[in-house]
Amino acid sequence: PFPVTHPCDRQSMVDVENPDLQRFPLFKEARGHYTIVDSQDLLYIPYGWWHWVKNLDRLPVSMSFWSKTPANDFSGGVPREFTEHMMTRVRRNLESMISNVNGPEKLPQTVVAMIDAIKMGGCTTALTTVRSLLTEVRVTDEQEQNRLLLAMFEGRFENDWQNHV
């Protein structure tokens, strides 16, 4: 997705009909489902699931309802394992936290500095903070943290976002 500070933050940067596999190599592994939704049909798409719609009619009507998912109850402690859904929320919350701490205007440069530090074995204040938070959600291995962070950030911050609007 676009960064959380971008007006299109809940939209994909990948052009589904003409994907740039150099910038988004994992897209080649994406597998879709195909359906035709008729008049009066309802299609439920869970939180965090990507979808792409192509209208076959001239005058389609679509309505989306966004609801806030309830906070996870950690009153009994941090879960032993995090579901994919929970990790989607963790990734989004980490990005928001980085933006809130450093300022939305500095989000791209902060993230690029983190990417560079990971690749070169270095460190930044933001990376240290993020590693600490990942440890709290049971992502303790540094190599696993690196994989998660690179998958989360690479290809999204190094270029002009306007190329993907």
Image: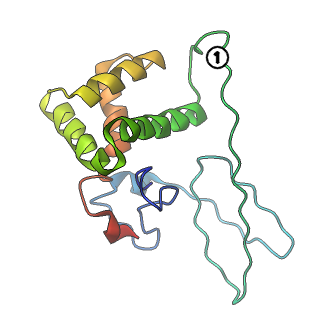
Residue at image point 70% right, 67% down? 35
Up-down relation of residue 15 to residue 121 (above or below): below
Query: Whole-percent x and y of residue 85?
Result: 59, 36
Q: Seen from this angle, which residue lies furthest bottom?
A: 58
Q: Looking at the picture, which amino acid does disc 1 mark?
A: Phe
Residue at image point 46% right, 16% down? 136
Q: Report whether residue 83 is seen.
A: yes
Up-down relation of residue 165 to residue 33 (above or below): below
Left/right of residue 12 with respect to residue 72 in the rendered view: left
Q: Report whether residue 154 is seen.
A: no
- Quadrant including the C terminus: bottom left
Residue at image point 74% right, 68% down? 63
Q: Seen from this angle, which residue lies furthest top?
A: 76
Q: Residues within 10 Å of mark 1 (few under 14, many from 20)?
A: few
- Quadrant including the N terminus: bottom left
Query: Whole-percent x and y of residue 150?
Result: 31, 39
Mark 1, residue position:
74
Secondary element under disc 1, as helix, strand or loop, is loop
Query: Whole-percent x and y of residue 43?
Result: 76, 60
Left/right of residue 87 with respect to residue 101 in the rendered view: right
Up-down relation of residue 128 to residue 94 (above or below): above
Up-down relation of residue 127 to residue 106 (above or below): above
Left/right of residue 43 with respect to residue 13 in the rendered view: right
